[in-house]
Image (cartoon, rainbow, N blue to C red):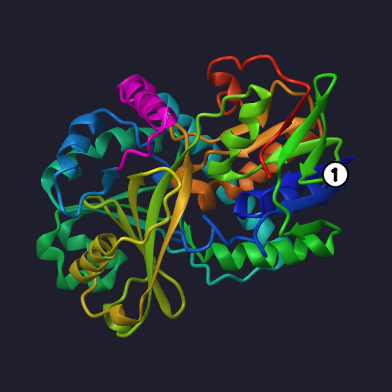
């Protein structure tokens, strides 16, 4: 069976690896010159199934209004001139109820916990080393209200049997010794000991090499211009004037997925949510974090690699704009200086931005489409690195007609409105 995977980020490469391991003939098409050069390049670095939390939650609409007027706000909205932006926002706001939050978090936790287990198996099988650490995640609360509000998430963690610790101010240094210096500014934290960290870009490059050794053929510099459908099935991928025949196709193009599928009448509610990161060399080991710390106030993660610290987070709704905004760098610097003063060399930091493909309910879209042989693996938002390994195996099982290890219910495109009738041939402008 010949399967073409579109996209060579961490989602696409993980999908290709699992398909190849199962015996499929796999081709990966990627418009960039190598793997993991866009959203997977410099993300926050944490593999955090325990922190798989929908952005759409009770109280978020009011918080969002307040954030619009704050200098270091975790969210900014810049109109991009499209109806899609406002439609996506309206859908997201409709998910901000306690009932929808519980459903969405449950779906996310199911996939994320599975994905962490698959990652461990994959890491051993492929013999990968990507500056990973298995020292957990610590979510920090700066005030008592945040600490009290965590009860809703704790109930879900208990329901899924996920280990956790609620730490008081004086216990934070047990998980992150350097926090002893700033504990007076904090109220407590939620520690998730089974979470991991690692360099997603390094992981994806290594996994691509291992996949190639299994026979996966990577075609870099190959921009997809459209899909060809005959008799209700996808039969080919178009690359300008070229044509690549397929038995099945997996679309793992992140925030570029909707544009590809719209000509087929398939509406994919994925919107690019812009995030930023700053990667700095470690300057003072004793002042640096040992794993990942999540600042609940600013929605920023501080993650330790071997000799680097990655500070990442925030969200801008601004279409496909990739402008690096100095104000966002200032927020990242503020957070790391607040929590780990003197730990990194900020002047030598590498500032980056990328577009996270987000669905209104924060849950990825994985599985079949109304077009035969056409599958989706997209919309992972801020949790692509966390969910990549499991998503790759899940969609590989679905493509190959195998019974997956976890229930895919609620993860497919069918949870949204039915698509329009499929057209026979569709192309994007070249």
- The local secondary structure at tag 1 comes to strand
Q: Which residues are magenta?
A: 78-102
Residue occupied by mark 1:
244
Seen in the picture, residue 74 relative to 32 is either above or below; the reply is above
Is 330 on the left or on the right of 313, as rendered? left
Seen in the picture, residue 409 relative to 282 is either above or below; the reply is above
Q: Is residue 403 visible?
A: no
Looking at the picture, tell me which residue is in the foreground, 259 or 10: 259
Residue found at x 39% / y 38%: 157
Looking at the picture, tell me which residue is in the foreground, 384 or 248: 248
Seen in the picture, residue 23 relative to 94 is either above or below; the reply is below
**Count the marks: how many?**
1
Is 213 on the left or on the right of 135, as rendered? right
Residue found at x 81% / y 45%: 241
Residue 79 lies in the magenta-colored region: yes
Is 30 on the left or on the right of 185, as rendered? right
Q: Position of residue 369 (x, y in %)?
A: 68, 25
Q: Position of residue 377 (x, y in %)?
A: 63, 39
Task: Point out the image quarter for the C terminus.
Answer: top right
Looking at the picture, tell me which residue is in the foreground, 147 or 104: 104
Q: Badge 1: how crowded within 10 Å, few (<14), some, or many (20+)?
A: some
Task: Point out the image quarter for the N terminus.
Answer: top right
- Please identify the residue farthest to the right as the structure is shown: 1
Res. 332 image quadrant? bottom left
Q: Position of residue 341 (x, y in %)?
A: 21, 75
- Please identify the residue farthest to the left as the structure is shown: 184
Is 390 on the left or on the right of 53, as rendered? right
Q: Is residue 94 visible?
A: yes
Q: Magenta stretch: dominant SS?
A: helix
Residue found at x 34% / y 21%: 94
Looking at the picture, tell me which residue is in the foreground, 140 or 206: 206
């Amino acid at each position: 069976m010949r399967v073409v995977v579109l996209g060579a980020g961490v989602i696409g490469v993980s999908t290709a690896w699992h398909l190849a391991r199962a015996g499929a003939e796999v081709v990966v098409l990627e418009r960039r010159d190598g793997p993991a050069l866009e959203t997977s390049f410099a993300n926050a670095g944490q593999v955090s199934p325990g922190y798989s939390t929908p952005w759409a939650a009770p109280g978020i609409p009011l918080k969002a209004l307040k954030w619009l007027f704050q200098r270091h706000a975790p969210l900014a909205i810049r109109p991009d001139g499209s109806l899609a932006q406002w439609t996506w926002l309206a859908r997201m706001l409709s998910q901000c109820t306690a009932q929808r939050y519980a459903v969405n978090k449950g779906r996310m936790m199911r996939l994320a916990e599975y994905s962490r287990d698959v990652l461990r198996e994959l890491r051993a099988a492929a013999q990968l080393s990507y500056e990973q650490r298995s020292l957990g995640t610590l979510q920090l609360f700066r005030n008592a209200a945040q600490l009290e509000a965590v009860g809703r998430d704790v109930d879900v963690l208990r329901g899924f049997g996920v280990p956790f610790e609620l730490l008081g101010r004086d216990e934070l240094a047990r998980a992150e010794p350097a926090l002893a210096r700033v504990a007076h500014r904090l109220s407590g934290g939620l520690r998730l000991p089974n979470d991991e960290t690692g360099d997603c870009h390094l992981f994806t490059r290594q996994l691509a090499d291992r996949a190639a050794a299994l026979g996966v053929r990577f075609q870099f510099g190959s921009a997809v211009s459209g899909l060809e459908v005959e008799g209700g099935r996808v039969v080919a991928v178009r690359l300008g004037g070229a044509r690549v025949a397929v038995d099945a196709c997996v679309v793992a193009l992140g925030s570029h997925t909707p544009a590809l599928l719209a000509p087929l009448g398939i509406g994919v509610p994925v919107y690019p949510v812009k995030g930023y990161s700053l990667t700095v060399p470690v300057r003072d080991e004793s002042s640096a974090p040992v794993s990942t710390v999540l600042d609940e106030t600013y929605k920023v993660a501080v993650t330790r690699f071997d000799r680097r610290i990655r500070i990442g987070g925030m969200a801008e709704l601004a279409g496909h704009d990739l402008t690096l905004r100095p104000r966002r760098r200032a927020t990242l610097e503020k957070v790391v200086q607040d929590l780990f003063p003197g730990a990194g060399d900020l002047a030598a930091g590498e500032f980056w931005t990328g577009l996270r493909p987000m669905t209104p309910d924060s849950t990825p879209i994985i599985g079949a489409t109304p077009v035969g042989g056409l599958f989706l693996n997209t919309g992972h938002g801020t949790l692509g690195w966390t969910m990549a390994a499991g998503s790759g195996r899940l969609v590989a099982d679905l493509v190959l007609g195998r019974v997956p290890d976890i229930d895919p219910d609620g993860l497919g495109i069918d949870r949204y409105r039915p698509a329009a009738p499929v057209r026979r041939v569709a192309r994007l402008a070249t």
